Amino acid sequence: MKIELESIGTIHTQFTEIEGMPIQPTGAKGIKGKIEIKEKYKDGLKDLDGFSHIHLIYLLHEVDGYMLEVKPFMDNNTHGVFATRSPKRPNRIGSSVVKIDKIEDNILHISNIDVLDGTPLLDIKPYVPQLYEDTIDELKIGWFETKHEKAKSQKSDARFK
């Protein structure tokens, strides 16, 4: 089945090159960016200003092809792509949780952004942790268990371009 999506806006950041970018929002603490929502989707922002954080779902537009097994930034072993957050995915979809600083008309000013400038935005969802806390009794995070602290300092390189 072929699926077609339309960008609802564009994410603007200071990152013009993939190499050297933070690999997760936790490594992008304090980094500012903005999102320009297309005019026809602006009314969808109503009441979003009541939330402090949002999930961004976006297209990894500078990634070509995919790999089913990858060596992620935070580990020296290969893993199946679906057990990683590697950008080299069959559908090139990325997600990040960012902080809303303010909303002005169709512009969202955000913090903790870890994506490339010009990234097409596919969707926004409010971050509501209480929706998940009650449903995850025994959380396991696989190989990330001993590696997740690296996400704060690890930077991207050209391996997934």
Image (spheres, helix red, strand yellow):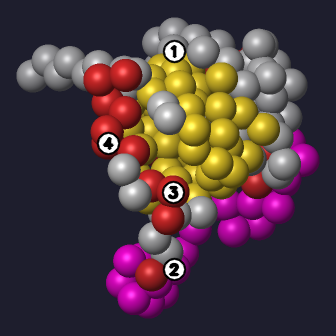
**Residue 111 percent across, percent down from the top left:** 73, 46
Is 97 left or right of 41, judged from the image as shown? right
Q: Is residue 91 above or below residue 138?
A: above
Give the CA separation, mark 4 to mark 3. Answer: 11 Å
Q: Which residues are magenta?
A: 131-154
The amino acid marked with disc number 4 is: Gly
Tag 3 secondary structure: helix
Magenta residue check for 146 = yes
Residue 8, quarter of picture: top left
The residue where tag 4 is placed is: 44
The residue where tag 3 is placed is: 49
**Residue 123 percent across, percent down from the top left:** 38, 38
| Mark earlier in primary sequence (2, 1) | 1
Give the CA separation, mark 2 to mark 1. Answer: 31 Å
Tag 4 secondary structure: helix
The residue where tag 2 is placed is: 139
Query: Answer yes or no: do the residues labelled 4 and 1 have beta carbons within 8 Å?
Result: no
Is 151 left or right of 113, judged from the image as shown? right
Tag 2 secondary structure: loop
Give the CA separation, mark 1 to mark 3. Answer: 28 Å
Give the CA separation, mark 2 to mark 3. Answer: 30 Å
Give the CA separation, mark 4 to mark 1. Answer: 24 Å
Is 47 left or right of 85, judged from the image as shown? left
The amino acid marked with disc number 1 is: His
Residue 72, quarter of picture: top right
**Residue 144 percent across, percent down from the top left:** 67, 60
| Mark earlier in primary sequence (1, 3) | 3
Pointer 4 local density, CA inside 10 Å: few below 14, some 14–19, many at least 20: few
The quarter of the rendered structure image containing the N terminus is top left
Q: Is residue 63 above or below residue 24?
A: above
The amino acid marked with disc number 2 is: Leu
Residue sitting at 44 percent across and 55 percent down?
A: 48
